[in-house]
Structures are given as structure tokens and as C-alpha cells.
Image (cartoon, rainbow, N blue to C red):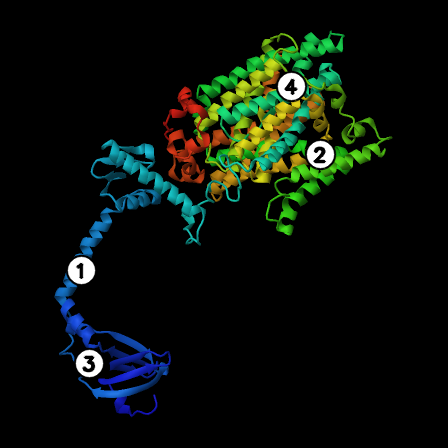
Amino acid sequence: MEGGGGEELAVGCVLSLRTTLGDEIQGQIVAYDRPSNILVIHILLALFDRIFFFFFFSNAGAQRNIRLLKANYIQDFTYLKKAGDPLDLNKCYIDLAGLQAREEASLRQAEIEAERIGVGVTCEAQSLFDALSKTLPVRWDKTVIVVMNEVRVSIPYLPENVTGGTPAAIDRVKKVVLEEERRGEGMAGGGGAAPAPKQDELQPHPVKDQLPNVSYCINSPPPWPEAILLGFQHFLVMLGTTVIIPTALVPQMGGGNDEKARVVQTLLFVAGINTLFQTLFGTRLPAVIGGSYTFVVPTISIILAGRYSNIVDPHEKFLRIMRGTQGALIVASTLQIIVGFSGLWRNVARFLSPLAAVPLVALAGFGLYELGFPGVAKCIEIGLPQIILLVIFSQYLPHSLHSEKPVFDRFSVILSVAIVWLYAYFLTVGGAYRHSPPKTQLHCRTDRSGLVGGSPWIRFPYPFQWGAPTFDAGEAFAMMAASFVSLVESTGTFIAVTRYASATPLPPSVLSRGIGWQGIGILLDGLFGTANGSSVSVENAGLLALTRIGSRRVVQISAGFMIFFSILGKFGAVFASIPAPIFAALYCLFFAYVGAAGLSFLQFCNLNSFRTKFILGLSVFMGLSVPQYFNEYTSVAGYGPVHTKARWFNDIVNVIFSSKPFVAGLVAFFLDNALHRHHDATKRDRGYHWWKRFRSFKADGRSDEFYSLPFNLNKFFPSILSNSTPGN
């Protein structure tokens, strides 16, 4: 500010300034504060601007354009003239009329805005109101949104809650409601950083279309060559259970390698048919339906029945026991068929919250821990390399090689199994197990399964191939108990498959429909004679997570492989002769994935609630502890803790309480629905409101996309048309 006298910076002087930033300012000095070195300038408008201001704004003389300028930023200035005192009280006045008019306008606007805010409604309801108000006249009637004075949208503000008005008006409002729901989920699923939510409004990760990083979901299959390889991979994974169960049961039934090979073929054939039925007409999820360990206990009870103990001929004993299991399975199938197709299970599933689902789904995977590393340890030199290679191929190599095509992570099972299987073959032919104990040779050698020699080249399994089924009431009741336990366990696995298939939460009606078709699967097991019942394959559900491909087509292709290799017995037996420790190594990863799917539902629950902690902790602990007690008691005493003269009753209780997911799910479901269920805070703590919109088939627009039956068959299954929701 050099070059000017003090009078040039006096209040009232008109200056032309140029700042260090290149701005040119012409104005009158109003004040100068020396401690802060700030100059207050009244900017003078150009002639054109003053004319514009005069004609378009009232009280133009009272308008001031003030700027605060740090004196350090003034590069130079020119003194123009001395004007009047800008702070002259005679020239400064308050426009009371203008202020009063602005106040009245603000009050009117505040009243209008207040009418737009709902009282006692959720943030989602207010967002829906705001979306409707953009194009339609809307008002609140307590908690009901009234559109165009005729259409009413009630709690919980879903499309089926839109009533009144003409059909055209209802359709228009429903369209906005549905678009607002999808827009809300889309905003939750991606985009830029969102503002931090309040502590009491914390939201879980979105059920993102529906799970992030899933490459192909139910309706988006991969290319055919890739789909075929992935389907073969599912076939390989399900072979483990398909071989292990007959290997354990058939020798106790009196059968040899020939009978074992035929049972494996039959179980594989029926599994292929059941998988096709489930993916086409059941839940339509990419779920493989195969043999279940749940049915092993009642089958062993049938094997040990006194009416078979006097049969001397092993083959005849095998046939008689097989016919007995067939009759028991046929009777047991009616339980799931009735409960599923009648809609009874739908009514139960509607009360299932994310909190109750956590123990059920988690122990459906974690509860099978005894089939994991204990099986690996039976031949550690084969099982441990399989685990290591699987982890390296699926987790490390994809991130290290940065390949454009995801080869290692999607086909890690085929690659690792091929390498370890070849390695086991070299150990076998090299004589590594020549002097080992028979048990070690059985688990480690690649030529001890007896399936290749016992399998015919071509054979078609057919119903009643073992003869006419026989029926016993006690055995049927025990098998029905296993069927009920399998129903509950399959519910947990279906939920995990839904998650990894990137679908919306499974509507209860669709779940009930799937249980009905699973009952038909058990009926086919009884008709064909598999010596075992069917349920959802937990290991294949874990494979969906490993490959991140939940395509329905891939699983249907795997069903084709099951049927094909069951008919061409020799070829199927080659793959079925893979040593069991290799499959046990795969289970370590796949069962863990399913258990983790159960834990993922904790994101919907309030983990700071002591009610949540109590239900979660007690159900998981009891789910592990009670079956452990039953299993230990049975292994020591030779019979279960319930040991009455009624053997069928003993089998029922022992089967039910030997299932970890059943016990955990039962405890969690009961406590969650009996402990302070109707409190508003409880509903949020248990996460029920997150799944409420999926309680009926029609409540979400994507239900048709994921779960609708082909060939317009929905009209033959009226249970899916029900839109009723429990009053919770």
C-alpha cells in the first residue's frame, strides 16, 4: 500500500484496487481494522448493473455489496475521489416491511414443509413420500401416505400395501414404490462414500445384487465351455459323500464290492434326477441334492434290527436290509412332501429372523467339522497337500499372477485334485504303502475302493431293483425323525446357497416348495434303493462361494454328469475311486464357507444387545454341546442316552438331538420368538425388519426373476401366491 497518503485510505474514499491474484475492484472504503489488517469495501456497481438493479429490485438504494479484503493482498490502488460518509445514519435504514414480508413467507413455507414430514414413520417411509411428491400430490394421514386423495400406501409401504383409487392410479403409485425400493438398495450397494450413519441407524452391508464380487448368479450363466467345466467340478465334489456313505453302510448290510458299486451308481443316478427337479421345480436355486449323513443313524438301526440277525447268506441279508430301508424311506418321504407342499413350513419360516438363522446356517457348515481334518489325518501325506494346493490355487495365485481370465480361482478344485490324485497314484504304484496296515492302505491307496472292478460297463438303475420294499412301523418312525432333521438342516443350507447364488432372501413359500420336492427326492431314494436319504449338499454350497459362480445352469450340467457317469459305471467308478482324504481336504474349505455364510447374517443384528448375545451364545453352545453328549454316550455304551424298551422312540430322540444345526436352530428359533418379541427395539435387534419385505413371494419384484417356475407352472402351486404376512 505504498505510494499513498493516509487520507487516501480514509473512510469514504473511492479507490480502484488490484489484488495480487489479478482481481480489479472499484469501491468505497467503509472501514479499516488495523489489528487484523482487514479493509471493508463497498463495491460500486457498473452503470449497467445499477440500472438493472434499479428496475428489478425494490429499495435499490439500500442494497450494499460488501467485501472484506486483507490489505496484504492489495498490489496497488488508485485514488479516485472522496465521497460521502458510507456509515451516515441518515442514509442507513432497516426495511421493516420487507423483513416482515420475508418472515411471513418463511412461516408459510415452514408450515408446508411441516405437513410433508410424517410423524412416527421410518426414514424409508419419508423417502418414499418425498419420491412420490416429486410428480404427484401427496399428503400424510397419520402414518398412511395418501396420493391424489384416493390411493393409500400403508405400513410397511410395499407394493402390495397400495390400495384405493383406479387401477391406473394404483399401478402408477406401485411403480414409484418399487423404483424407490430398488433405488435405495442401489445407493446402498455402490457409489461414492456415504455420510457416517448415526449409531442407532447403522446399516448392514447391502444384500447387494445381492452379494458383491459374484461373477455369475442364478440367471446369468457363464459361457458354455466354462459352464461345463464348472459343472464337472460340482460333480467331483459331490462324489465324496456319494462314495463315503455306501462304503460305510453296504459292508454292514452284508454286501460286497459289487453291491457297493451298484449302490453308489444308484445314489449318483437319483442325485442327478433330484438335482434337476430342485433346480427346475423346487427352490430353483443352484443347489445339489445328494446323500445325507443324517439318514445314516436310522439306517444303521435298521441294519442292527433283530429280524435280520438270523440270515446267514450275506447277499440275502443285504437284499432284506435294503428292502427294509426302502420301505422306511418311502414312508419318511411323506413328511417332507406334506409339510412342504401344504405350506406348513412356509408358515414356520416366516418367523425366522437373521438372528435365528445365524446358528442354523453356521452349524450346518461348522457342525460337520468331524468330516474335515479327522478325515485328512487318515492319510496326512495326501490330505494335507490337497488343502495347501487348494488354498494356493484359489487364494494366492489369482492375486499374484494378475491373469485376465480367472482360471485358478474358478478351477482350483479340478487342478488341485488332479495333482494330488496323480501324486497318490505314484505313491501307490511305487510301493509306498506295501507294508502299511490295511486301514492305512484303504485310505491312501488309489486301488482299494473296489468300485472299478465291481461296476458294470453300462447299467441303468431302476425302481425296485432290489425287490419289493418291506415296511416296519418302528423303522419308519425313526426314518421320519431323520427326515424332519434333514428338513431343518436343508433349510439352513438353502439359505447359504441363496447368499452365494447372489439372490434375494428366499421367500418362505419358495422354501416350502423346495422342501416338498426334497421329499419327492427321498421318495425316489426309497423307490430306487439308495440305502440313504437326500438333502442339500453342504459341500457344493461351499463350492459356490469358492468359485463365486452361483449359476443354475452350472448345477444342472453337474446333474447331467451324475446321470451320465452313473449309467457308464466303469467311467464313473474311476472318479469315485479318488481317496477319501482328498475329499476331506475339500470339506475343510467348503464347510467353512457355509458356516461363514451363517455368520454373515450377524450384520443384520445388533451385537450390542444383551438379548442378541444371550440367544446367539446359548444356541451355538447347545448346538455343539448336546449332540456331543449324545455321540459320546453312544460310542461308549453302544446305545443312546434315551434307552427304553421302545426302540423306535429311542431312535427318534437320538437322531433328533445328534444334529448340531437342528439343536442350535431349534433353541435360537424358540428364544427369538418367545423372548420380548413384540418390542420395537427387539425387532431391530434381531434384524427382522431387514427380511420383512421378502416374507411373501409378491413383495419383491425380483422374486419372479429368481424363483418363478418355468413353463408358467406357478398356477399349479397356489402356495406361492399367498401374500399374507405374520403380524410381527
Q: Amino acid at mark 1?
A: Glu
Give the left or right position of residue 631, taking residue 184 as reference: right
What is the spatial separation of the Cα atoms under label 2 and label 3, in whole angstroms?
Answer: 92 Å
What is the spatial separation of the Cα atoms under label 2 and label 4, in whole angstroms?
Answer: 23 Å
**Mark with earlier residue (3, 1):** 3
Specify few, some or many for label 4: CA neighbours under 10 Å numbering under 14, 14-19, or 20 or more.
Answer: many
**Mark with earlier residue (4, 3):** 3
Marks 3 and 1: which is nearer the front?
3
The residue sitting at the right extreme is 435
Tell me the quarter of the picture where residue 482 sits.
Answer: top right
Q: SS at mark 2?
A: helix
Image marks 1 and 2: residues in contact by CB distance under 8 Å: no
Q: Is residue 128 above or below residue 640?
A: below
Q: Amino acid at mark 3?
A: Pro
Give the left or right position of residue 192, taking residue 75 as reference: right
Q: Amino acid at mark 2?
A: Ile
**Mark with earlier residue (1, 2):** 1
Which residue is disc 2 drawn over? 582
What is the spatial separation of the Cα atoms under label 4 and label 3, in whole angstroms?
Answer: 102 Å
Instruction: Residue at 25%, 45% (x, y): give it.
Output: 135
Specify few, some or many for label 2: CA neighbours under 10 Å numbering under 14, 14-19, or 20 or more.
Answer: many
Near-viewer residue (707 or 591): 707
Specify few, some or many for label 3: CA neighbours under 10 Å numbering under 14, 14-19, or 20 or more.
Answer: some
Which residue is disc 3 drawn over? 86
**Mark with earlier residue (2, 3):** 3
Tell me the quarter of the picture where residue 375 sits.
Answer: top right
Marks 1 and 2: which is nearer the front?
2
What is the spatial separation of the Cα atoms under label 4 and label 1, in whole angstroms?
Answer: 85 Å
Which residue is disc 1 drawn over? 103
Specify few, some or many for label 1: CA neighbours under 10 Å numbering under 14, 14-19, or 20 or more.
Answer: few
Tell me the quarter of the picture where residue 46 sits.
Answer: bottom left
Q: Which mark is residue 266?
A: 4
